[in-house]
Amino acid sequence: MKTAQARWRLRFYGRVQHVGFRYTALYLTRDLYLTGWVRNLPDGSVLMEAQGRTAQLRKLLIRLKSQPHIHIEKTEIEEIARVEAERNFRVL
């Protein structure tokens, strides 16, 4: 049975810049075998695209929200087309 795969575009609002969010995301996504990227936006939010097994994407959200130094007030999630050739996760 094939495991469900997805790519999510996530936008995080709250205390998500200047708290190590991007590098925490890098560590967590590597641990969960996800690919994609993360970057800060000028308005103080963080934009991420993450791809992999749906269960792992859900775990990523739970783990990010449980970080004591990060305070996510709101998360927007959109499922988008997968990027087949992508092999890693990076900080932009």
Image (cartoon, helix red, strand yellow):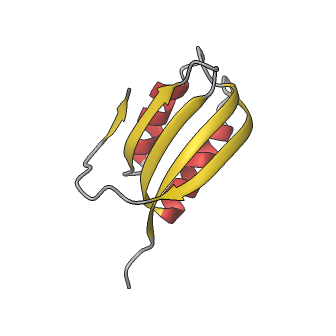
Pick the residue in front: 28 or 12.
Answer: 12
Q: From this viewpoint, which residue is outermost toward the bottom?
A: 1
- Residue 58, above or below 66: below
- Residue 3, above or below 32: below
Q: From this viewpoint, which residue is outermost toward the right?
A: 73
Q: Is residue 30 visible?
A: no
Q: Give x and y (percent) for residue 43.
A: 64, 20
Q: Give x and y (percent) for residue 50.
A: 45, 48
- Residue 91, above or below 55: above
Residue beneath the point at 53% across and 63% down: 55
Q: From this viewpoint, which residue is outermost toward the top?
A: 18
Residue beneath the point at 43% across and 43% down: 29
Residue beneath the point at 25% across and 48% down: 87
Residue beneath the point at 37% across and 80% down: 2
Q: Quadrant of residue 75?
A: top right
Q: Give x and y (percent) for residue 80.
A: 48, 57
The quarter of the picture where the C terminus appears is: top left
Label tally: 0
Q: Give x and y (percent) for residue 45.
A: 62, 27
Left or right, residue 18 beside residue 65: left
The quarter of the picture where the N terminus appears is: bottom left
Q: Is residue 48 visible?
A: yes
